[in-house]
Structure formats: structure tokens, C-alpha cells
Amino acid sequence: MNVIVANQQREVLSGLDIDIIKNVTGEYDADELVSMFRNFFFGRMILDVTAIKEYQNIANLQKIATNLDAEKIILLLPNIPEMSSSSYLSKIISMGYYNFTTNLDGVKYLLDHPNSYKDVAHIQQLNEMPDTPMDRVSSSVGDSYVLGIKNVTEQAGSTTLIYMLKKELEHTFSMQVTAMEIGKNDFGYFNEKNMISVTKDNFAVELLKHKESDVILVDLNDSNIDETCHSVLYLVEPTTIKLNKLLRRSRMALEKLKGKKIVLNKSLLTNSDVMDFEYEAHVKVFFNMPPVNERNRNNVFHGLLAKLGIIDKGSGGKEEKSGFFKFF
């Protein structure tokens, strides 16, 4: 059975002759739509993009893709230049939306002949020049290496990992490091210099302010500005409960990470376990990170940093003990 979410194009969608289990009309926050359909079983959702409040902000589409199965959604896009450009389409394809059109005939075709990634891969302009100020940020921060980190499973440890990476790079490798978190205020609990909480709107300005840093670590949280970073690590805590929660929200969640730098964080998996994980999830693991004591420096990070090219292979440094109340 199918779901229709319509707004400005409701008259167009009224021409569909399909079985409908739910039909809603109006303008909704992305969070409202997620709440409405997260636990609602449907075969296909025809989503008039104008039904999403602030639909021009692609972060709202990202929020829906993260919480619902994007492969089941057919996007009916407004027939306007900014939403038919290869740059825009490339971004929504990266989110997992493979079915999109601007007219009723397209919707009808996609209902019977849904696309897979290989059907739309040719649209992606992976090497195109950035076409917005935000897209140009990463090429305007001097020699800084901008490393984004994002939780995929709930509370996978991005905030603490950034703190530990920052301390390791500063103390062992004498680098100038700035850390930023977008949309949250958790960094304040570390009582550490150059750990900044920013909004998505002022992120670009803050990034340019710190272009003299050797490394800028960014806790991306729910933002969809991964493309501003030189590299992004996607953190997965590979416990049964965390993985099952993730896949219950979106059964394609791991498949969307294909080709990306997946880090198994707080992981107790052996090399053999990691190979089994890769086989079952059909993805490649970039790095397997064990649980680490945040009060000590630990050279377990050196392998990750070397693999990213931030430090040379074989680099090392002295470990340093720290007191229990060091943060206060």
C-alpha cells in the first residue's frame, strides 16, 4: 500500500490511480513527517517536496532520509532550476533518494520501475566544482585538514573521540588543532580551549576564522555539510542493540555508507569479527577503534591518523598520565 504526502502539487497527485493507505495534505516539519511515518508500514511514499517546511534547505531531506527508508520514497520536485541541477540531484542521491521526478508521468513510471543506485549513478558529479559559498569553504581554509566525524548509531562517541584526537595531535605531534561541534553544546563539559560550539549558519564563518589551524575537527551531528570536509568518519558502535536500532529506523542505513569511511568505534570486535561484519553488511570498514581511556593519551589513534594522512606512518610520541580530576 502507498502513502501520499502532498502540498502545492496535490492536484497533480490527485491523478494517481493507486491503492492508498494514507493521504496527508499540508506543510509539515521534517521531524513531524518522521514521527508520522517512522513506525508506519508502507510500500511506497510519494512525497511532494513542497510539503516539507523549508524544503529548500536540503538538511530537511537529509533528516527524512536518515529516519525513513529513502529507497521507498518517490520525490516529486518543483520544476525549478535549483532543484533540477546536477549538483542538487547529486546531493539527494548521496542521501539514498534514487527516485525523483517533476511530473505525474514520472511518478507513475517510478512506481512500476523504481530506480536503484546504478540507474542514477551517472547523474552524480563527484568531481564537479562547488557552486555555493558553503561548498567552497573547504577549499578556503588554507592548509588546514578538515576532518568531519558523525555518529551513525546512537551515541557512537563522536564528541569524546574528537576530544581525544585533539589532545593526541596537540601533545604528541605539536599540531595546532581546533574542534567544532554543530548544533550542540557538549564541548563545554571538557573545559578545553579551542573547542567551539557553532550553529550551521555560522559554521562557515568560524571555519574561516581558524584557517591557521593544522587540523580542524568537526562534530557534524545532524548537519548535512559533509562535503565541506576533506574526510568524514562515520562512527558505528557495532553492538547488537545499537545495530538493530539503526536498522529498525532504516534497513538501508549501512548500505548508504558504501564507499565511505566507516569507523567501528568502542569496538571489541576481532579482525575475524570485522571481516564477518563487512561480509554481512556489504560495506568496507575503514578502521576498527577499541574502547579507549579518555584520561590517557593512547597511540591507538596513530593508525587512524596515519591512514587519513594527517600524520606520517610510524610516527609516535610519549604517553602522559593524567589525574582523575584533570578536567576541573
Image: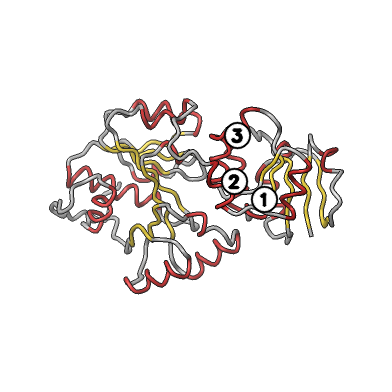
- For residue 38, which quarter of the picture? bottom right
Residue at left offset 63%, top offset 55%: 69
Badge 3 crowding class, 10 Å Cα cut-off, few under 14, some 14 to 19, many 20 or more, is few
- Relative to residue 10, is residue 43 drawn left or right? left
For badge 2, the amino acid type reads Lys
The colour scheme used here is secondary structure
Find disc 3 in the rendering and name its residue.
Answer: 57
Find disc 2 in the rendering and name its residue.
Answer: 63
Separation of marks 3 and 2 at Cα, in angstroms? 11 Å
Task: Say if mark 1 contacts mark 2, CB within 8 Å.
Answer: yes
Q: Does any portion of residue 191 appear in the rendered image?
A: yes
- Residue 64 position, x and y percent, is 63, 48
Task: Say if mark 1 contacts mark 3, CB within 8 Å.
Answer: no
- Relative to residue 91, is residue 316 drawn left or right? left
102 or 271: which is nearer to us? 102
Which sits earlier in the primary sequence, circle 1 or circle 3? 1
Residue at left offset 50%, top offset 65%: 243
For badge 1, the amino acid type reads Val
Which sits earlier in the primary sequence, circle 3 or circle 2? 3
- For residue 123, which quarter of the picture? top right
Badge 2 crowding class, 10 Å Cα cut-off, few under 14, some 14 to 19, many 20 or more, is some
